[in-house]
Image (tube, helix red, strand yellow):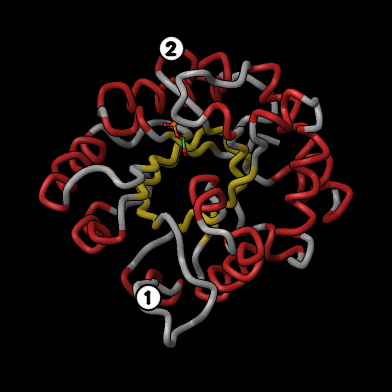
Amino acid sequence: MERSRIVAANWKMNVLPSEAKTLAGQVARALPIKNVEVIICPPFTHLFSLMPFQSESLKIGAQNCNENLFGAHTGDISAQMLKDLGCSYVIIGHSERRARQSTENARISAKIHAALQAGLKPIYCCGEGLPIREKEAHIEFVKDQLESDLATLQKEHIEEIVIAYEPVWAIGTGKNASPEQAQEMHASIRKWLSARFGNDLSIQTQILYGGSVKAVNALALAKQNDIDGFLVGGASLNVDEFMKIVHSVSESAND
Ligand code: PGA
């Protein structure tokens, strides 16, 4: 079965609100690209102004949400608020948040439930750090993350989820996982999904790779059987570079 492809831009804490429409507009004008859905995930402050760019081929997502529907959580944003604004996706469990917020790991499952309840599609991030990779414990480590973050979900939830494998040692370092390293992990994630939720769901779940994806390495990664697209950080801030990545993913889908 051919899974549809996704390239998601994670702008992180970059781009000013006054610059966001220009950057998103350049991406929007370069779409649609065959077989690829593009998602832009800007900072919260830019979401409202980017909603008019949403289309069949371009969706807008947030970079995080709180696990509660509303209440006394100063400085936080709920999934319902994002949905009401018009967002389609929300990134949950990015390693930069897992590393810097001590309670983040324990909240991920609840955040996924909140996002799904609000009608958002979670882009759920998992991935190991360098010490784990060096010990060759990466497969087990990511399986444990999946168990603690996704095991309470029902089959119909998994249908709405996009998984992003992002090895921490590859994020923002310029050192991407090799196609073989990424494929090994993506196949293992799919195997875990199959054991937990059945083969049909595992086959239809989109699994993205993230970590120093650039125009030069995108095609080789995208050609791997279990890689269905990318979550792109740094390279998503340059339209030419980003669109080359989108084209590579499109090309790999046509193979
Ligand atoms: P990078 O970031 O492409 O800059 O490595 C990816 C991510 O953190 O999602």
- Residue 33 lies in quadrant: top left
Residue pictured at 49% horizontal, 82% vertical = 69
Q: Look at the picture and state if 64 lies above or below 2.
A: below
Residue kind at label 1, given as amino acid type: Met
Q: Look at the picture and state if 37 lies above or below 180.
A: below
Where is the N terminus found, in terms of image quarters? top right
Percent coordinates x, y for residue 86 in the rendering: 34, 67
> Could you tell me how far apart the alpha carbons at marks 1 and 2 are, in whole angstroms?
38 Å
Q: Quadrant of ligand 1?
A: top left
Horizontally, residue 219 falls left or right of residue 31, namely: right
Under circle 1, the secondary element is: helix
Per the rendering, the mark at residue 144 is none
Residue kind at label 2, given as amino acid type: Val
Per the rendering, the mark at residue 216 is 2
- Residue 244 lies in quadrant: top left
Disc 2 packing (10 Å; few <14; some 14–19; many ≥20): few
Residue reaching furthest to the left: 18
Percent coordinates x, y for residue 159 in the rendering: 66, 57
Q: Earlier in the sequence, mark 1 or mark 2?
A: 1
Q: Which residue is mark 1?
A: 81
Residue pictured at 49% horizontal, 15% vertical = 217
Residue reaching furthest to the bottom: 71
Which residue is at the front of the view, 82 or 109?
109
**Ligand 1: does it lie within 8 Å of the C-beta at label 1?**
no
Under circle 2, the secondary element is: helix
